[in-house]
Amino acid sequence: MEVETLESHLERHVEDQRLRKLISSFAYISLDAQHHFPKYLRGTLGDKNKYGEAVAKLDEWVNGYLCDSLVKTGLVAKIYSEELRQPLIASANAPFFVTLDPLDGSSNIVTNNAFGSIVGVYAEDLPQTGKRLLASFYKLYGPVNTFVYSIGKGSHEFVKHYDSEGNAKFLLLAENIKVPEPGEVFGLGGDPLEWDPRFLKFAKDLFRVEKLKVRYSGTLVADFSQILHRGGLFAYPSSKKSPAGKLRLVYEAQPLALIWEQAGGASWSEEGSLLEVYRQDVDSRIPVYFGNRHLIEKLQKALS
């Protein structure tokens, strides 16, 4: 039986032809970008981004490449990117507004660990809640290239494959992904000495009571992919040093929350589902929790 391609899957599941084109285009745009990664792997520019963080050469180059390529599709009205101080205004007549984390996990570049790209798509300009997402998708540059998308009707994973003529295709790896129960692994970001003591106790119970194994790489997309396939919990909680959290709501948390909740998991933010949170500032940070439903329920009780 022939394995379904990304294009045919989108044809079956996404009614809007323009949205189909945007999703498919990004899968191949990001693949093209990866071919250039070796040229930009080392060093920083000496500049800082809008968050005061050092900018890696690869960060800047990938952001420019992805933004330019998305604009060329003619489908994007405006791009909000972690690496842009101001939104990039593209075409007033284009149908979509895009959020972009062009290179999630760039601190892992020098160690050649996995990193990725995260995208959210809206029909109206931001600010919006995550409930208004038309689609979200991420690309994981790991040992193999995988691409996961959701339009709010399940979450679906594809893997890069070369045909006999050397042409790249994305083939269906898993349709309607479901988070395994009861869960197997967890990853927690930040400094445990800075955590709320209640969360620290909960974290210890993930070992002692839930019998989960710790897995943490420092790349959100990679750690997210771990629990998506194995079940468990990922959290980057608030701390004394960062009471508002570290991860960005719009660029990181909400696009992944759509994929996660469509796979049967629960997201939480101390304000309810991450998809329900509204911020006027698109650059705002937030404590992030993704987990199997029973683990999120225990977390909520632990922090109440």
Image (cartoon, rainbow, N blue to C red):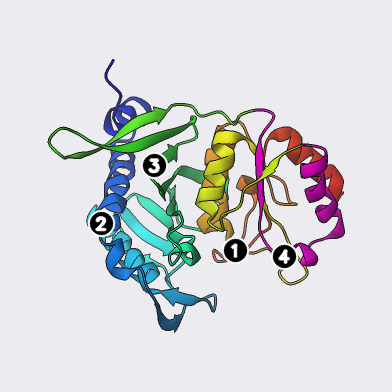
Q: Kindly check if marks 1 and 3 are in contact, taking CB atoms under 8 A apart as contact.
A: no
Residue 162 placement, left or right of 14 = left
Residues at marks 1 and 4, CA–CA distance in whole angstroms: 28 Å
Q: Is residue 278 above or below residue 23?
A: below
Q: Which residue is mark 1?
A: 280
Q: Residue at x 71, y 57 (%)?
A: 237
Q: Which residue is mark 3?
A: 147
Determine which of the numbered discs, if any, sits on residue 68 in the image. none
Q: Which residue is mark 4?
A: 191
Q: Is residue 18 above or below residue 61?
A: above
Q: Kindly check if marks 1 and 4 are in contact, taking CB atoms under 8 A apart as contact.
A: no
Question: Which x, y percent locates residue 194?
Answer: 78, 67
- Give SS at disc 3: strand
Check disc 3 and give the amino acid type.
Answer: Phe
Check disc 4 and give the amino acid type.
Answer: Asp
Question: Which x, y percent locates residue 285?
Answer: 62, 63
Foreground tag (3 vs 4): 4
Q: Kindly check if marks 2 and 1 are in contact, taking CB atoms under 8 A apart as contact.
A: no
In the image, 103 versus 112, the foreground residue is 112
Residues at marks 2 and 4, CA–CA distance in whole angstroms: 35 Å
Residues at marks 1 and 3, CA–CA distance in whole angstroms: 30 Å
Sequence-wise, the earlier of marks 2 and 1 is 2
Within the image, what quadrant is residue 70 found in? bottom left
Q: Residues within 10 Å of mark 1 (few under 14, many from 20)?
A: few
In the rendered structure, which segment of residues is drawn in magenta?
A: 181-210
Check disc 1 and give the amino acid type.
Answer: Gln
In the image, 304 versus 93, the foreground residue is 304
- Asked if residue 208 lies in the magenta stretch, the reply is yes
Q: Which residue is mark 2?
A: 35
